[in-house]
Amino acid sequence: MKVTDHIKEAKDTVVSFEILPPLKGKTIESIYNHLDPLMEFDPAFINVTYHRSEQVFKKKADGTFEKVEVRKRPGTVGICAAIMNHYKIDAVPHLICGGFNLQETENALIDLAFLGIDNVLVLRGDAAKNETLFEPEKNGHAYALDLLKQTVNLNNGIYLEEDIRDGYKTKFCIGVAGYPEKHFEAPNMESDLRYLKLKVDAGADYVTTQMFFDNKKYFEFVKKCREAGIEIPIIPGLKPITSKKQLSVLPRTFHVDIPTELSNEILKCKTDADVEIVGTEWLLAQSNELKKAGVPVLHYYTLGKPHVIANVVKELV
Ligand code: FAD
């Protein structure tokens, strides 16, 4: 079922979760162990992130080094299929531009369609570790907008090669990313919103936001989106802070602010267990305010902390 249909059919705010594929060497059981404690909350859907290859230097037998491409977290598509089969819950795979040419993108989308997956979150992806700025694959997409257009084309039965046009159309519900605190490469919010509006005009069905810790940022973002003519659902992305280290890691990695009130409380904590308590309370307060404001979905980035998310969701009012 499509994310937008879940939203349309829901009588109240629903919850959804986002997970990362495990590091190579783990089994699907690690995914089930992660998700099992969250199933009692009846998530509408579960997102699975996509991670492109990283270039690393590997030592050869002769002692010299060679540059090789390594994917540390493969498995997005397989995990989505397993989730749908095991829990009978809709999975939302993330699909990125980085590392895919047009043909590979088409093949990936066809794989998803074969598996009966109705949803996809289309993203550009971040620059690889060795790149200063994002570099598209040769004959690949430079922006999420272009990947979105290719997905919409398949929904309309338009494939790369004419000879496979047999009238078959995919039926993806397409999500895109939005940034309440602006995408870090955008010169200003207006510019970022202009490109978001292009994604909407090209056929995006809903937006999922980057994490934020101050609800005002989300409410202002939604207001600006509506003023810019963006009418589709805007799903807030939420994450708990669970360690002191994250006070600097999260702003550096995700380009988000942490409110002074929250950072002050975290700095007073003696241990990360104390930070987790503060982070849980903050996330619960954020979630309840968003729910009261009538957001369609509370989308939680679980990031290895399902028990924290469970502690929040079970206390939602
Ligand atoms: P785009 O929409 O392409 O925007 C990128 C930048 O270019 C923005 O600054 C935008 O303003 C600008 N821009 C957009 N279109 C154009 C255009 N046509 N011309 C000029 N400028 C333009 N990353 C992963 O690698 N894997 C994941 O699974 C993943 N999941 C995510 C989930 C969510 C909910 C979010 C919010 C982010 C996720 N990311 C993920 C990170 C995301 O890939 C990065 O933030 C990336 O840098 C931008 O992706 P985007 O889809 O927003 O890009």
Image (cartoon, grey):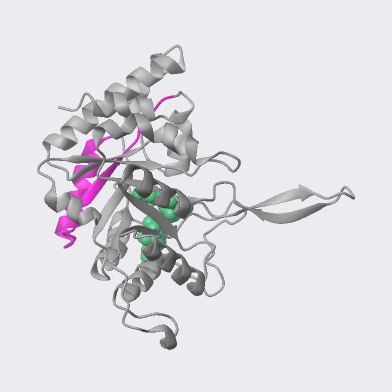
Picture layout, residue 299 above or below residue 100: above
Foreground: 119 or 125?
119
Picture layout, residue 266 above or below residue 22: above
Picture layout, residue 316 above or below residue 5: above
Q: Residue at x 15, y 56 (%)?
A: 226
Query: The N terminus appears in which quarter of the rendering?
Result: bottom left
Residue 224 in the image: state x and y as whole percent.
Answer: 19, 53
Marker count (numbered): 0
State the residue lying farthest toward the top. 270
Compared across the picture, whether 59 is left or right of 182 comes to right
Residue 148 in the image: state x and y as whole percent.
Answer: 35, 67
Query: The C terminus appears in which quarter of the rendering?
Result: top left
Looking at the rendering, the quadrant in which ligand 1 lies is bottom left
Determine which quarter of the picture holds residue 24. top right
Determine which quarter of the picture holds residue 213. top left
State the residue lying farthest toward the right. 62
Determine which quarter of the picture holds residue 301. top left
State the residue lying farthest toward the left. 11
Q: Residue at x 41, y 29 (%)?
A: 305
Foreground: 126 or 24?
24
Residue 147 in the image: state x and y as whole percent.
Answer: 40, 68
Compared across the picture, whether 201 is left or right of 112 comes to left
Residue extent of the magenta highlight:
214-242
Residue 261: tell me if it is visible: no
Residue 114 in the image: state x and y as whole percent.
Answer: 39, 65
